[in-house]
Image (cartoon, rainbow, N blue to C red):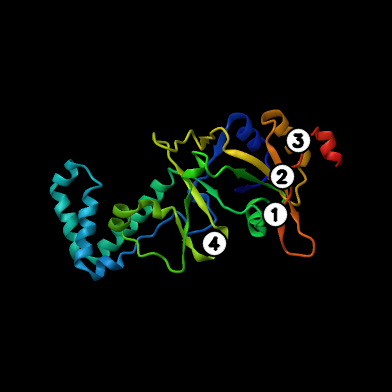
Amino acid sequence: YHYQPFCRDHLITLLRDKKLFFSDPHNVNDPWDCKPWFDYRPMLEDPVKREQMIVFLRTLVSQEMLANPLRAVYEDSLRRDNDALIKDVERYSHDLANEIGKRRIYCLTPFPESTLMWSHYAKNHHGICLEFDKDNALIAKARPVKYRKTYPEWTPQGVMENNPLELLLTKAMDWCYEREFRVVATSLDGPTKLYGNFVILPDGALTAIILGCESQDRAEAVSIVNQYAPGLLIKRAVRVPNRYKLSIADAISIVDPATAASS
């Protein structure tokens, strides 16, 4: 499931053009998310790890740069000068954040009835929630986010050699209520290719649209579905009587917007 505000143009693009909007990871609402800050302390405390970082940094440059006599001077400064090493690790953190910003992410959750998710991401229950087939080729690529109580001890060589995706799939425990899964896309040829900020939505991936319990756009949503995706289910979140709980009601019949507006 994916929560979002109701926007007529975005919904038309999704249904008519089969294009799913992927977000810039730099626009997420968590200041640590997708903005890794590498830890220089392991290299300061352990000469072996310091040397491992230097060796790793060699893999990032051309043979011509490695042959430059100044390269040896630079590497020697990393071995001997703690301030130089700290500044280099911080620079690499910034550079990697810029590289992550070239990718786009799509966030999903297993739950369509989360009060907080409707509040935070679907315009205070006025928006919509998209329901997907989890076995669809695109949605099946979603990977779970790992929630941690403490910030990881990330070093450039450790993360990039073992699991680079960890940088996009790790968040603070504060966010664990989201139970988030993510699909990561790039502009490069590969399994999930970007076209601008969009990924082509495979047939059958979208199975329903759920309207928030405070939605005022039911008639418009019905009209858009009738025109661009006839037969797609529309559901709605409803308040459970006498409980602080939402449930997802049975599908609303796709009827004439005038009828829907009066119902």
Whichever of callouts 1 and 2 sits on the residue coming sooner in the sequence is: 1
Side (left or right) of 187 relative to 246? left
Q: Residues within 10 Å of mark 4 (few under 14, many from 20)?
A: some
Distance from Cα at disc 4 to Cα at disc 2:
26 Å
Q: Residue at x 44, y 36 (%)?
A: 193
Between marks 4 and 2 in the image, the one whose residue lies nearer the viewer: 2
Percent across and percent down for residue 192 are 44, 38
Please state which amino acid type lies under the numbered disc 1. Asn
Q: Residues within 10 Å of mark 3 (few under 14, many from 20)?
A: some
Q: Which residue is mark 2?
A: 235
Distance from Cα at disc 1 to Cα at disc 4:
18 Å
Whichever of callouts 1 and 4 sits on the residue coming sooner in the sequence is: 1
Distance from Cα at disc 1 to Cα at disc 2:
17 Å
Q: Which residue is mark 3?
A: 254
Q: Which residue is mark 4?
A: 175
Whichever of callouts 3 and 4 sits on the residue coming sooner in the sequence is: 4
Mark 3 lies on a secondary structure that is: loop
Distance from Cα at disc 1 to Cα at disc 3:
25 Å
Give the tally of numbered discs. 4
